[in-house]
Amino acid sequence: MEGLAKSVESVQPTNVIQAKDTKPLGHHTAIVHDEIYKFFNIASFDNFNKGHLNTINRWALKEGSLGTGLKKLMQLETKLGAPHVGETRMSKLFNWIRLSDNINSVRDTMQTELHSVKNKTKNAISDVQGSFKDRLHKVDTEISNLTKDYKKAEVHYKLNATIDSKKIRNKYGKQLEELRQMRTAFKGGK
């Protein structure tokens, strides 16, 4: 090490600090597009309004490209009119978007609950219909069985009634014939 300077010989190796884990930029990262900053005439390094800008950016880019989103912002700004004294354009748009998101959230929750009630009602009705059909089938079977029993009893009693009536007719018929003959004999021949 004769040709090297003494400062090089005494250099100690330094510890290299590991780099922090960084997240790749993607859909889940809240990045506000530069054109949104330009729309509100604020610097992109302004972190004071970051929350408002993130909300506005998300709403503007929800359904399409940046151009469509900026057009939506301009239309909304025109629709809402000029901000009141002391209110900024950004805060007016942010408040409307925040309220709109809240309304949509409540509306979605309401629709979910209405669908669950509708499904419960459909299930209850189908259960009742199934039970009704089952009970109706049982009642129809019972009616069919009772009708068969009735017809059997009717035939049986008609047959027995015929036999019994013959016996009664024979029994009383003989008596009636004897009484008629006596009457005829008593009247004198008619």
Image (cartoon, grey):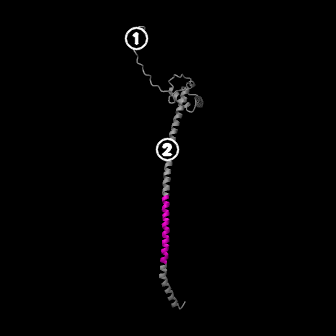
The mark nearer the N terminus, 2 or 1, is 1
Q: Quadrant location of the C terminus?
A: bottom right
Q: Position of residue 144 (x, y in %)?
A: 50, 63
Which residue is tagged 2? Answer: 116
- The amino acid type of the residue labelled 1 equals Glu
Place residue 43 in its image quadrant: top right
> Residues in magenta?
137-165
> Gap in Å between the C-alphas at discs 2 and 1?
78 Å
Instruction: Please give the label number shown on residue 133.
Output: none
Q: Position of residue 114 (x, y in %)?
A: 51, 43
Which element type, helix, strand or loop, lies under badge 1?
A: helix
Place residue 21 in its image quadrant: top left
Q: Quadrant location of the N terminus?
A: top left
Which element type, helix, strand or loop, lies under badge 2?
A: helix
- The amino acid type of the residue labelled 2 equals Ser
Crowd around label 1: few <14 · some 14–19 · many ≥20 (10 Å): few
* 85 within the magenta span: no
37 and 34: which is toward the camera: 34
Nearest-to-viewer mark from 2 and 1: 1
Q: Are marks 2 and 1 in contact (CB under 8 Å)?
A: no
Q: Is residue 119 above or below residue 190?
A: above
Which residue is tagged 1? Answer: 9
Q: Residue at x 50, y 68 (%)?
A: 151
Q: Residue at x 48, y 56 (%)?
A: 134
* 153 within the magenta span: yes
Crowd around label 2: few <14 · some 14–19 · many ≥20 (10 Å): few
